[in-house]
Image: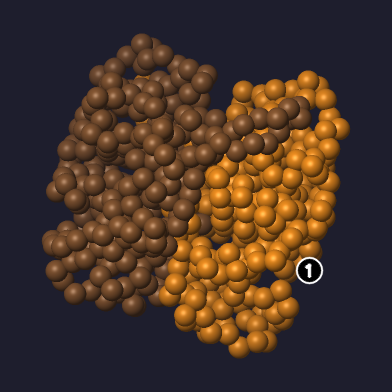
Chain colours: A brown, B orange
């Protein structure tokens, strides 16, 4: 199963998690595995852009993807170098084009209580006139993807407290990225697509994060016409999805899901009764979406 | 039970959620309630600081709390006005002190893949020499708080896809704030504390969000010596908690929890076997922490 993944989490890789000691509710001593987070400062040419807290496994992909999703790297930009200094915790992305984003950096949007998100006006501008390519989405693909993704070894299964996003094609997960924040995970995917020259038109994006406006906008700007999540929706996320022709699937667990955008592109080619209910162990421990 | 809350979610309040139509996994038409998110631009005196995406129920608290948690409003600042223009989606916080945060605004940290977080260096600086007041934490309080909070009417129970943070004292939830992003929910609490002149030393902060470094730092800077969550930990969050003397409880569900900092302040005065396992309906649908 996991041989289908081009990139999949490697929970055993050093430095991504650590064991910590404490006590449980009965006062018994316990050793718990918890994920690491460390700062990574991203430069675009000579300009310091942001410091991201990340598990640190794909710093180059994160830097390139972040800059793409912020609109600071353009689709036609020639990247001349991506230099990572692990000791300093710095990545420098260099382009042939001279860049200066002083103004853009000053105007920030916190989205969903998060983010150095794209400036609000810029976000909506990027969407103007955007219509995603119509693409059918088969329920059988969704079920297959969920099964393969949920059973792949992951930091989530090892240590929890982490988000995952997976770039897929039909029923094949391709690139599965995890990180402490869902936006990092998405940006790593965008970075991979940029560095590999892969487009989004034939892809599906699967995420554990909520389908907020920012998540929907990023997916659309990455050119991906279908977005699926275990989690729920926001009203604006749904509106934007409908506006750009993105098929939006949420609350996806076991055999259940809800489609609030693009149902006309959805093909019910699976018998839900034949899909096992989600095993107890996989019911994402927790909390809210 | 909910009469103990000074502030509790009001899911029926207009404008916080909306019904949207779609289809489910069987192709049947469904109406789903989803939370709203709308932009709120926060000004400090004449300076535009950030645009936050929020459900919009406590704009003044969010603005004040955001500025406090970013270190732009100081504990001794005199707030002369907090003006909210609903139509424009703007809040202006005015202080007697003249302010200018050009430099600070330029240097942003994305934390946990999120945020216009506090500049990284500033965050760690604010913690230097900080030691929280030692405060006992009773397991019986944790169980009582979880029960009262989980059964209070909330947008989460109505529409999902939302985070909640609750300021508590012993076994009493006091101020329960929700928002699309967990950082908004925490900031609303900080805003309430600032506007009401309430300190944190005798409080517990309960959150549905993950116990990342940023969450731990915010709690510490709010002067609150105990932080509990349904969700999990990061290694840095645990380290910081230990450094500042914050009691850190995570993976709290039903009778279970794990304490990775401050176990010496934890009093096991409850019989876990007497605590009901979490009812099915409350098992937070989904996804990752």
Q: Dividing the picture into quarters, in which one does residue A274 lie? A: top left
Pick whichever, B120 or A174, lies toward us.
B120
Looking at the picture, does residue A156 appear above or below residue A133?
Answer: above
Looking at the picture, does residue B269 appear above or below residue A63?
Answer: above
Q: Is mark 1 on a helix, strand or loop?
A: loop
The percent coordinates of residue A90 (x first, y second) are 36, 61
Q: In this view, does B156 lie to the left or right of B147?
A: left
Looking at the picture, does residue A47 appear above or below residue B146?
Answer: below
The percent coordinates of residue A252 (x first, y second) are 41, 29
Badge 1 is on which residue?
Answer: B197
Q: Kindly identify the residue that appears in the image at 29 percent across and 25 percent down.
A: A2
Q: In this view, does B6 lie to the left or right of B161?
A: right
Local crowd size for mark 1, using a 10 Å CA cut-off: few (<14), some (14–19), many (≥20): few
Q: Kindly identify the residue that appears in the image at 61 percent across and 88 percent down.
A: B98
The percent coordinates of residue B256 (x first, y second) are 69, 28
Q: Kindly identify the residue that appears in the image at 59 percent across and 33 percent down.
A: A32
Quadrant of image for the N terminus of chain B: top right
Pick whichever, A47 or B62, lies toward us.
A47
Looking at the picture, does residue A37 appear above or below residue A202?
Answer: below
Can residue B213 be seen here? The reply is yes
Which residue lies most toward the right here? B269
Q: Is residue B12 left or right of residue A28?
A: left
The percent coordinates of residue A203 (x first, y second) are 21, 38
């Amino acid at each position: 199963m996991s041989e289908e993944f081009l990139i999949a989490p490697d929970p055993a890789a050093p430095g991504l998690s650590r064991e910590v000691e404490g006590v449980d509710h009965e006062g018994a001593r316990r050793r718990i595995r918890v994920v690491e987070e460390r700062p990574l400062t991203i430069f675009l040419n000579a300009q310091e852009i942001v410091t991201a807290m990340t598990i640190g496994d794909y710093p180059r992909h994160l830097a390139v993807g972040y800059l793409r999703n912020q609109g600071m790297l353009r689709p036609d930009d020639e990247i001349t170098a991506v230099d990572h200094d692990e000791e300093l915790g710095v990545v420098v992305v260099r382009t042939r084009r001279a860049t200066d984003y002083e103004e853009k950096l000053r105007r920030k949007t916190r989205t969903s209580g998060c983010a150095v998100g794209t400036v609000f006006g810029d976000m909506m501008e990027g969407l103007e006139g955007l219509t995603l390519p119509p693409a059918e989405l088969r329920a059988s693909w969704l079920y297959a993807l969920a099964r393969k993704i949920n059973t792949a070894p992951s930091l989530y299964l090892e240590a929890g407290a982490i988000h995952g996003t997976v770039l897929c094609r039909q029923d094949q997960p391709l690139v599965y990225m995890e990180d402490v924040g869902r936006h990092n995970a998405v940006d790593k995917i965008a970075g991979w697509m940029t560095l590999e020259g892969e487009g989004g038109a034939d892809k599906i994006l699967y995420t554990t994060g909520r389908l907020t406006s920012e998540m929907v906008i990023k997916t659309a700007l990455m050119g991906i016409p279908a977005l699926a999540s275990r989690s729920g929706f926001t009203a604006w996320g749904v509106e934007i999805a409908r506006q750009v022709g993105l098929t939006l699937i949420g609350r996806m667990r076991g055999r259940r899901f809800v489609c609030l955008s693009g149902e006309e592109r959805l093909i019910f080619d699976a018998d839900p009764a034949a899909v096992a209910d989600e095993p107890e162990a996989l019911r994402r421990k927790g909390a809210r979406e």
